[in-house]
Image (tube, helix red, strand yellow):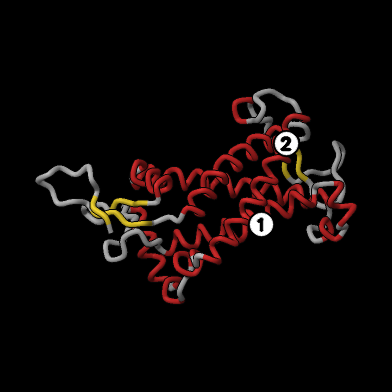
Amino acid sequence: MLPCMDSPANATPTPSIKRHAIATRLWHWINAVAVFILIGSGLGISNAHPRLYWGEYGANFDHAWLTLPRWPGWLTIPGHYNLALSRRWHLFFALVLGFALLAFVIASLINRHFRRDLRVRRGEVAPRHLWADAKAHLAFRFHDPARPGAYNTLQKLSYATTIFVLLPLLIVSGLALSPGMDAAWPWLTSIFGGRQSARSVHFVTMAAMSGFVIVHLALVILAGPVNGVRSMITGWWRVPEDGA
């Protein structure tokens, strides 16, 4: 535990704790760039045919379960309609996302990050405990003074869902959309019930991932963006003076 060097001389030094290992920090920033570009390029690809189907086939005269809006240029990559460029951006950063996730999982198993920080104990998922966590979040109390720097239950559940459900599902459903993967592993498309079903799952999962990103950024801002961003760069997190 180290004191912060920028505290006034007449004030009690605010302690800092080592919160994020270098593997977590590297993955966080690589993942942030990859997800941002994948969402933008994915919306650019969606503009080519903004309709979602279930099953193997989907065309203009088939029944779509969802018709998407045409996304504006400021949300897409590139900023104008260009299907070929959107696909190139998307496929390249899909590889970045996949290999970065694999490296992060291996590193987190070695340094016990998952077991130490993300393991959800039985008592933490009790309705009473979850309700207490939800009320604390609604009151903008994001940190437990008794366990500074530790993730609360809602954080553990959201991070674990993102790492072990959303990201793998994005990767696998994206692979199912590739003709090359379909030729090599025909069962990959079958597990989703068809190529168009895989496309629908891919889009819905992307929407969930986008929601996670929005909520994550909002909570970082509410909890103190300077402290949060600094900890994800240096690894050191400054314990709030009031424990809140």
Q: Of circles 1 and 2, which is in front? A: 1
Q: Is residue 163 left or right of residue 91?
A: left
Residue 103 seen in the current view: yes
Q: Is residue 26 left or right of residue 186?
A: left
Percent position of residue 48, x then y: 77, 32
Check if mark 1's residue and mark 2's residue have beta carbons within 8 Å.
no
Expressed as whole percent of the image width and height from the top left, the position of residue 214 reads 50, 43
Could you tell me which residue is drawn at 39 percent across and 59 percent down?
134
**Mark 1 highlights which residue?**
168
Q: Looking at the image, which residue sits at the far left?
A: 10
* Image height of 183 relative to 90, above or below: below
Alpha carbon separation for disc pair 1 and 2: 21 Å
Which residue is at a point 70% across and 52% down the rendered structure image? 171
The residue that label 2 is drawn on is: 46
Query: Label 1: how many residues lie within 10 Å, few (<14), some (14-19) or many (20+)?
Result: some
Q: Quadrant of residue 137?
A: bottom left
Pick the quarter of the image with the N terminus. bottom left
Q: Nearer the viewer, residue 90 or 196?
A: 90
Locate residue 39: give its quadrant. top right
